[in-house]
Amino acid sequence: MIPERSLMLILNYTPQTDAAQALWVAERALQGGVNWVMLRVRDLPPRLALDMGLQLRHMTRMAHALLSVNPYPALAEWCGADALHLPEAAPPYTPHAPMMLGRSVHSVEAAVHAETEGSHYLLVGALYPTRSHPEKSPEGVALLQAVRSAVALPLIAVGGITPERVAECLQAGASGVAVITGITEAADPTEAAQAYRQALLG
């Protein structure tokens, strides 16, 4: 169910988000080869993000792509997401099958714990300097290599990923990459997604 080479677009949804713009970016990115969209909701009740979630669910189904919702279990269920994604510090939760569970992890210990709790995939980072999390020191691909040695789950590299850095992430053990500003702030999200897709396929 998880793509062999995942290209995940992370869409941040906050009170300041232009919903129409976010949906336009998602549509264009899916056309460019994104095969997984994560709706990451911050500072909003889940019900206020339901319309966005349902529209993304429709888009991703049409594009044969996956949809993750972060971090609300109820929102994930309401919009029929393929996966519930949780931050590293969130309490354990087991979604109803067939919904998958994903975790963001920033250490080997957290990765092992997430695998033990039943996660199906992990986002590992932040690997490089990133504007979305300027407070976090980048870990570099050494973290990715260490997590790859410790767990058997699919790993998705996140944090400052550019098309030029994709090959390094794959060599370190990732099966895909997650992107925020590299696509959302691109003049043409389709072209940006295509560049990542080409890098993933090597």
Image: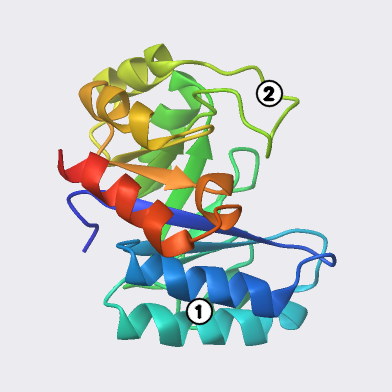
Q: Residues within 10 Å of mark 2 (few under 14, many from 20)?
A: some
- Name the residue rendered at 37%, 22% in the picture: 144
Q: Position of residue 45 (x, y in %)?
A: 79, 72
Q: Which residue is mark 1?
A: 56
Which circle's residue, 2 or 1, is located before the other in the chain? 1
Q: Residue at x 52, y 45 (%)?
A: 182
Residues at marks 2 and 1 touching, judged by CB atoms closer than 8 Å: no
In which quadrant of the rendered image does the C terminus lie?
Answer: top left
Give amino acid for label 2. Lys
Residue 60 in the figure: left or right of residue 77: left
Q: Is residue 141 left or right of residue 91?
A: left
Q: Residue at 53% x, 33% y: name it.
A: 159
Question: Which image quarter holds the N terminus?
Answer: bottom left
Residue located at (39% from left, 28% from top): 112
Position in image of residue 172 (x %, y %): 27, 21
Asked whether, in this view, residue 98 is left or right of residue 106, the answer is left
Q: CA distance from mark 2 to mark 1?
A: 29 Å
Tell me the element at label 2: loop
Q: Where residue 122 sits in the image (x, y, percent)?
A: 40, 41
Disc number for residue 117: none
Amino acid type, residue under disc 1 in the picture:
Leu
